[in-house]
Image (spheres, coloured by chain):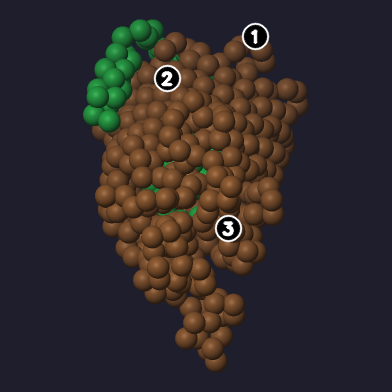
Chain colours: A green, B brown
Amino acid sequence: MIGKLRYALVFLVCLTGCTQQVMPWERGFLAKPQMQLDTDPERSKIMKHTFSSKEAATGGYGVGGGGCGCN
Amino acid sequence: MAVIKRNKSALSTLSLAALALPGVMASAADSDQYSVDTLFSRYSESQNRMKIDAYQASAYLPLTDTLNFRVNGVKDVVTGASPVTYYPAAGKAKMIMSGASIADVRDAVDISASYTNNLGQFGVDVGRSSENDYNSSFFNIDSKFDFNQKNTTLALGYGFASDNVWAIDHCPPHCEGMVGNEGKYRRSGVGGDKQNHQGLIGITQLLDKHSFVQANLTYSYSGGYLSDPYKAVYAPWVTEPYPNYADSGFMHDTRPGEKHQIAFLTRYVRHFSNLNSAALHLDYRYYADTWNIGAHTFELSWNQPIVDHWSITPKFRYYSQNAAEFYQPYYTSQRTDGFYSSDYRLARFGSVSGGVQIEKQFFSKLSVGFAIDFYKRDYSYSINGGAGSPVDNFTFSILSANINYKF
């Protein structure tokens, strides 16, 4: 598990290496609703809750929420 | 007055658009407008298994330019049946279901506050979830810091949850020592407390004026009672009768008392000007834990604005995991580590799912949407290894409808 973690950290460090500087007045497209990471937070919440109660994998999207007795 | 108000609103919207950095704005609703979001969804599993009606509501309250609150509430109404255990029949696993006896309600509420200043954005979230057989209390803190002329955002987060789980039986039919006192009672010998700590570090980076990428790394530690009190395993060397079942040869689901998990998520979002401002969302997540489960998740969606504030979003998802090192559909001999589970969620399997969402906005204030999603789990879809069984193949669908209003 630790070995795979190393690749993730290398990716994080390299992330800023291949980008263009975007000025504030150039961010109109990025600010559109369809460009948000979660375009529909309520629906996204129920889908993630469903997947995490039917699959072993969880995490990545943020911290938060309690568990459930989902079967 | 109306003109001034309209100009203020337009200026505010323009400022938000100019300063918005993906990852800083949690959602399009995080503006200077009060808003209410509601969602109803119906989850239905194949073979008359679980059915869940979920009611969600969320209110966003921006008190000042720098301080806002959000209140979320969820009610799940759960009915149906779930696999309890498996036994060998002609060399194959045969499932024993709980019967259509599950009837539960989950109520969850959480309140969050977010404060923004020159240093960054700071949030706290506190909540509680309760069911007939499960309680959870949790809090989370998160922060976001911009640098590189707001082209890069660093996110840090921590979450803690304290849970208590137990099993409920009904008399009748399970009336051992309960005759004359019919109703629900707590099964003895199973259940307990567990705690979970989560940490997150993430970076969101603008690539150009049409695209950005996010990479998140989360680590989670769980300790305590991590077994499922309703699940049993076939263990032919056990001579005592299993509680509520006449047969011997079964024992309680017994998992390690600790689990470390990591998840590495990368998300890519791209805007297409020449396709009516469509947006592509691509996600990949790698997951691993100390129960030796590894999993890959790929997600793709395409948000297409059409005309007159209509939009359509098709989605596709693929998931694959390998089995936990102690998982077996049924056991024929004792394990030296003493861990046993036949929970289908710890098996080797894969799944494909997809759906479509349609959204319509009215007067820039009211938004109404509808979505349908299908999910198919199959033992043979896994690209990972380990034990598993086709007996656990199933499908489910989710129908959902939402109404959102900005004041």
Of discs 3 and 1, which sits in the foreground?
Answer: 3
Of discs 2 and 3, which sits in the foreground?
Answer: 3
Q: CA distance from mark 1 to mark 2?
A: 21 Å
Q: CA distance from mark 3 to mark 1?
A: 55 Å
B348 w.r.t. B277: above or below: below
Badge 1 sits on which subunit? Answer: B
Q: Amino acid at mark 1?
A: Asn
- Few, some or many C-alpha atoms within 10 Å of disc 1 (few <14, some 14-19, many ≥20)? few
Q: Residue lying farthest front? A: B90
- Few, some or many C-alpha atoms within 10 Å of disc 2 (few <14, some 14-19, many ≥20)? many
Q: Which residue is mark 2?
A: B213
Badge 3 sits on which subunit? Answer: B
Write down the quadrant of residue B158 in the picture.
top left
Q: CA distance from mark 2 to mark 3?
A: 45 Å
Q: Which residue is mark 1?
A: B274
Please give left or right for residue B151 compared with residue B167 in the image. left
Q: Residue lying farthest bottom? A: B180
Instruction: Say which of B309 and B184 sits in front.
Output: B184
At a point 56% along the width and 45% down the height, the residue shown is: B92
Instruction: Say which of A65 and B182 sits in front.
Output: B182
Q: Secondary structure at mark 2?
A: strand
Please give left or right for residue A44 compared with residue B222 in the image. right
Can residue B358 be seen in the rendering of this structure?
yes
At a point 64% along the width and 54% down the height, the residue shown is: B49
